Image: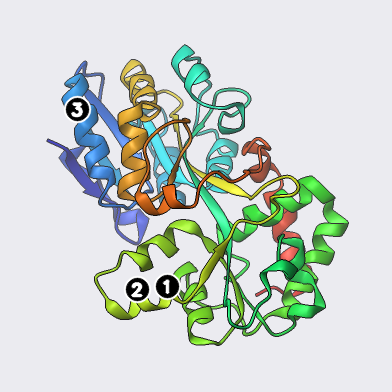
Amino acid sequence: MIKHARLALPLAVAMAGSALATGVAADELNLYSARHYDSDEALYQAFTEETGIEINLLEGDSDQLIERIQREGEASPADVMITVDAGRLWRAEQEGIFQSIESDVLAERLPDSMRHPEGKWFGFSQRARAIFYDPDTIDASQLTSYEDLADPAFEGQVCIRSSNNIYNQSLLASLIEHHGADEAEEWAQGVVDNMARDPEGGDTDQIKGVASGECGVAVANHYYYVRLLKSDDAADREAGESVEILFPNQDGRGTHVNVGGAGVVEGAPNKENAIRFLEFLASDEAQKLFASDNFEFPVVEGVAMDEVLESWGDFKKDEINVSVLGENNPEAIKIFDRVGWR
């Protein structure tokens, strides 16, 4: 059984109550999670079934959980923090949330790009930041890279989320790494100039903007598209089916990918269980759950995926270490501000 607690707003009045353990217990793990997917329940149940370790789950957004752990101090029961996007993992790292760990299992199972250089956190699922387009109005041969989004040929065509979205911050952080800050700023200005509308909504709204004809091109994480294709709502399926997906930069560095990741909390009272949990997340069983239930790409090669993901075949992924996305995050935010990306 998984014991649940959820942080409420405001954080100052949120208490986990009796749902979290307060000390070392051989058969428990205290997990602070900023992932809010029903499919993760299957991950936690599978871990408990395999190990006998019960999970005490506290849910909140990343900033809430970071503040909570800091407020709890040395008395914090937190063993593992799990969240999405390297930018958020980096923020937690900067606040001293994670400790370095060594694991032969993680070193063997995870590619270098998915492991923090000092072992402070690890990526366990991949999220491709793809381009979506209207095949009736957009010539795909003229749209092969993220850089093309800034081409004046696409003036008034681009739909993309706001600059406070962590996915966009990490995308810009990757461009800073590959091109330098000056060129990255030129790109960001070009995208602003090409926007079909002021940034609004989430990733799904960007894809639907293409389907409705409001824009010709959109940027979104791939799994939002799969959700539309598999939706119980006929209108959502129709929207997804009217749009094509494109994985950028296949002739160069590859498509930008981000992560769902986790690390062992500094002072974790159940450190051995925490490491065991991270190692489980790298197992074939857990990787398959990431790929089949939430439509994320596994980080371990050879793991079976959802049929839609399988149908796309192999594509080239950017292999820079995801820790760089966090390191470049402050500069990305400054660039967004300077170019007026709302």
In the picture of the structure, the residue carrying the numbered disc 2 is 237
Say the numbered circle drawn on residue 48.
3
Q: SS for tag 2?
A: helix
**Mark closer to the chain start, 3 or 2:** 3
Nearest the viewer among 119 and 317 is 317
Which is in the foreground here, disc 3 or disc 1?
1
Q: Looking at the image, what colour scheme do you see?
A: rainbow
Residue 170, percent from left and from top: 63, 52
Say the numbered circle drawn on residue 184.
none
Residue 189, percent from left and from top: 79, 71
Compared across the picture, whether 305 is left or right of 112 comes to left
Nearest the viewer among 283 and 310 is 310
Q: What is the CA distance from the residue labelled 2 to the residue labelled 1? A: 6 Å
**Mark closer to the chain start, 3 or 1:** 3
Identify residue type, mark 2. Arg
Image point (38%, 48%), residue name: 34
Identify residue type, mark 1. Glu
Q: What is the CA distance from the residue labelled 3 to the residue labelled 1? A: 39 Å
Image point (35%, 76%), residue name: 236
Image point (61%, 23%), residue name: 118
In the picture of the structure, the residue carrying the numbered disc 1 is 241
Nearest the viewer among 216 and 10 is 216
> Is 23 located above or below residue 139 in the figure?
above
Identify residue type, mark 3. Thr
Q: Is residue 337 in view from this perspective? A: no
Q: Residues within 10 Å of mark 3 (few under 14, many from 20)?
A: some
Which is in the foreground here, disc 3 or disc 2?
2
- Quadrant showing the C terminus: bottom right
Q: SS for tag 1?
A: helix
Q: SS for tag 3?
A: helix
- Quadrant showing the N terminus: top left
